[in-house]
Amino acid sequence: MRLSKSIKIVQRKTPGGRTVEHLKKERFSYTLCRNCGAKLNKSRLNPKKLSKVERRSERPFSDLCPRCMKKVLKEMVRK
């Protein structure tokens, strides 16, 4: 039986030796930098429950960390 994609059924052993099923809720991961994989300073909330403005930052290259964004901007200026 599948409740939803965000809830998984996990089997656990109790101290008494029985095997029981627990419902495990999915944890949302942090947003990662597209280039280097560093953790960005965004909330760990459910992105589907946030509004469009809260989901993305207003700066250019919002999917990059500040260091990678600085490198990209330097390359664009030098071209």
Image: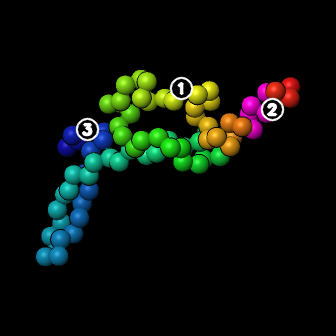
From the image, state whether disc 2 or disc 3 is nearer to you.
2
Q: Quadrant of the C terminus?
A: top right
Task: Characterize the local packing of mark 3: few (<14), some (14-19) or many (20 or more) Cα atoms within 10 angstroms.
Answer: few
Q: Main secondary structure of the magenta part?
A: helix
Residue type, mark 3 in image: Ser
The magenta segment: 71-76
Residue type, mark 1 in image: Glu
Residue type, mark 2 in image: Glu
Residue under label 3: 4
Q: CA distance from mark 2 to mark 1?
A: 21 Å
Please tell me whether mark 1 sits on a helix, a strand or a loop: loop
Q: Tell me which numbered mark, 3 or 1, is placed earlier along the sequence.
A: 3
Q: Quadrant of the N terminus?
A: top left
Q: Residue furthest right?
A: 79
Please tell me whether mark 2 sits on a helix, a strand or a loop: helix
Q: Tell me which numbered mark, 2 or 1, is placed earlier along the sequence.
A: 1
User: Which numbered circle lies on residue 58?
Assistant: 1
Q: Residue furthest top?
A: 52
Q: Residue at x 64, y 40 (%)?
A: 66
Query: Is residue 54 left or right of 35 when viewed as pictured?
Result: left
- Residue 23 locus on image (x, y percent): 21, 51
Q: CA distance from mark 2 to mark 3?
A: 45 Å
Q: Residue at x 79, y 33 (%)?
A: 74
Query: Is residue 1 left or right of 53 when viewed as pictured?
Result: left
Q: Is residue 25 magenta?
A: no
- Give the quadrant of residue 22: bottom left
Q: Residue at x 35, y 30 (%)?
A: 50
Residue under label 2: 75
